[in-house]
Image (cartoon, rainbow, N blue to C red):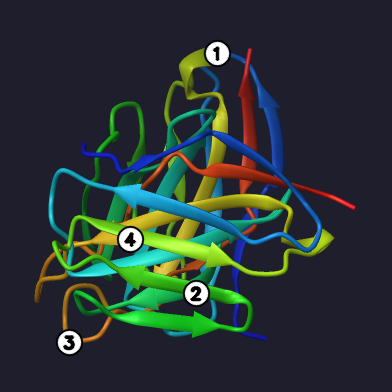
Amino acid sequence: GQQLNQSPQSMFIQEGEDVSMNCTSSSIFNTWLWYKQDPGEGPVLLIALYKAGELTSNGRLTAQFGITRKDSFLNISASIPSDVGIYFCAGQFYQAGANSKLTFGKGITLSVRP
Amino acid sequence: EAQVTQNPRYLITVTGKKLTVTCSQNMNHEYMSWYRQDPGLGLRQIYYSMNVEVTDKGDVPEGYKVSRKEKRNFPLILESPSPNQTSLYFCASTLRGGGGLAYNEQFFGPGTRLTVL
C-alpha cells in the first residue's frame, strides 16, 4: 500500500519555539488529517482538512491542505511540554461506498526541551 | 462516554497459539477497522468492515481474520501467530464508511501490544 512521506523522524525544539511539519504524497487525497499519539494511547485527531488550499486552526495548531492535494503541513506555535508525542499525517481518498482507509505517514516524534 | 475499547492491552504468546483481540465501540458506528503500528512504518490497515457481516482486506491482511457479527464488536483473530506479527494493534471506528460528503472522524482504541515468541 502507499505511504505518505514525513520527515525527519524526530524533532527537538525548545519550549516556546514554533515548529512546522510537512507531509507529501505521490497520490492525491480529498481529505488530509493530522493526528497526535501520546505514549500508551491511540492516535487522536488534531485537525481535519477537506478542501485544497484550506487553512484551519485549532488553538496553537494550524494546518493547510496543499493546492495540489498531494501535501499538507502542520504548524505548532509557542510549543509547550505537553506537545511531546508522535505526530502523524494521514490522507484519505473519500468515495461513496468505498473503504474509509486512512493512509498514514511514518510519524514524527517531537521532543520539547523545557 | 463514547469510546473504542480493546482487550487485552498487552499480550505475550508463543508461535502457533491462536488468539483473539477484541474491539468494541459504543457509538453505533457502522465502519470499523484494524491497524498495526510498527516502528518506522506508521499505521497500516489490516482489515475493515463497512457494516455487520461486511468485511474486506486492507493493506496487510496475511495471517489475520476478522468477523463482524454485531455492529459494536470487531474481533481480530490470529489463527497461528508468528513472530512477525509482534506489533501494536489499533482498532478504529467511524460513523459510516464511504458515504456522505464530509469526513467522519475515526476514533481509535488505546491499542494492544502483542508479542509473539
Mark 1 or mark 3, earlier in chain: 1
Q: Amino acid at mark 3?
A: Leu
The secondary element bearing badge 3 is classed as loop
Disc 4 is attached to a residue of which chain? A
Tell me which residue sits at (40%, 52%) in the image.
A22
- How far is the residue under mark 4 from the one under mark 3? 20 Å
Q: Amino acid at mark 1?
A: Thr
Query: Is A96 drawn above or below residue A27 in the view shown?
Result: below
**Residue that mark 1 sits on:** B15
Tell me which residue sits at (55%, 30%) in the image.
B87
**Residue that mark 4 sits on:** A72
Mark 2 or mark 4, earlier in chain: 2
Between B93 and B26, the one nearer to me in the picture: B93
x then y, percent, for residue B90: 52, 50
x then y, percent, for residue B65: 34, 40
Q: Nearer the viewer, mark 2 or mark 1?
A: 2
Q: Amino acid at mark 4?
A: Ser
The secondary element bearing badge 2 is classed as strand
x then y, percent, for residue A66: 24, 65
Disc 2 is attached to a residue of which chain? A
Q: Are marks 2 and 1 on the same chain?
A: no
The secondary element bearing badge 4 is classed as strand
Tell me which residue sits at (55%, 13%) in the image.
B15
Q: Which mark is residue B101?
A: 3
Disc 1 is attached to a residue of which chain? B
**Residue that mark 2 sits on:** A62
